Image: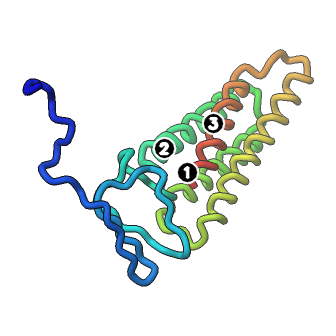
Amino acid sequence: MEDQPKTNTSSTPPSRSTIFNGGVTIVHGNVGPFGVVGNNSSIQADYIAGGDMVIHQPRAEEQTRFADLLSDLKEIINKAKSAGELDGQLAQQAIDSLSEAAELAQDKQPADPPKKKNAILQKLSFVTDLIDTAVDTFNGAGSGPAKVLLHALPILGLLLKIAARIF
């Protein structure tokens, strides 16, 4: 039995005592992922099982991906404009809305985060409606499918999903 690995890697086991102090709950030791704190309390813990827990803070890679998708979408809109699938004025409105969404997304300390999220979603929804209408119009004109604009729709869906999650 001597050659078996030790299952307890710490030299002293953590204490599991809980101290109540005026609405603050201090838990010493490991905290599992299903801990609940109620009654307007806060919790302080040394170790939290399950890795980093982030609440209401988007990860940097999601914001980077959002920005990359916005720039990809702008390129697709410019290609569609060059291919004749999208009118110049409509293309400019879409690019302006995407630029405004990008500016809102870069705001690190918004005055009202729900308004920021709604504004970004509204800009993206406007571009989605604009492109959807343009695809229908182009296809209805007998010019064949709007090949370039059709690439924009899945990207817009992904942008809406990411924006709803991270903002």
| Disc 1 + disc 2, Cβ < 8 Å | yes
Residue 116 picture location, percent across and down: 62, 62
**Amino acid type shown at disc 1:** Ile
Which is nearer the N-term, disc 3 or disc 1? 3
**Amino acid type shown at disc 2:** Glu
| Disc 2 + disc 3, Cβ < 8 Å | no
* C-alpha distance separating marks 3 and 1: 12 Å
Which residue is tagged 2?
Answer: 62
Residue at far front of view: 1
Q: Is residue 123 left or right of residue 55?
A: right
**Which secondary structure lies at badge 2?**
helix
Which residue is tagged 3?
Answer: 158
Residue 33's disc number: none
Quadrant of the snapshot with the N terminus? top left
Which is nearer the N-term, disc 2 or disc 3? 2
Q: Using a 10 Å C-alpha cutoff, classify the residue at mark 1 as few (fewer than 14 neighbours), some (14 to 19) or many (20 or more).
A: some
Residue 150 picture location, percent across and down: 72, 25
Residue 78 picture location, percent across and down: 64, 34
Q: Using a 10 Å C-alpha cutoff, classify the residue at mark 2 as few (fewer than 14 neighbours), some (14 to 19) or many (20 or more).
A: some
Which residue is tagged 1?
Answer: 166
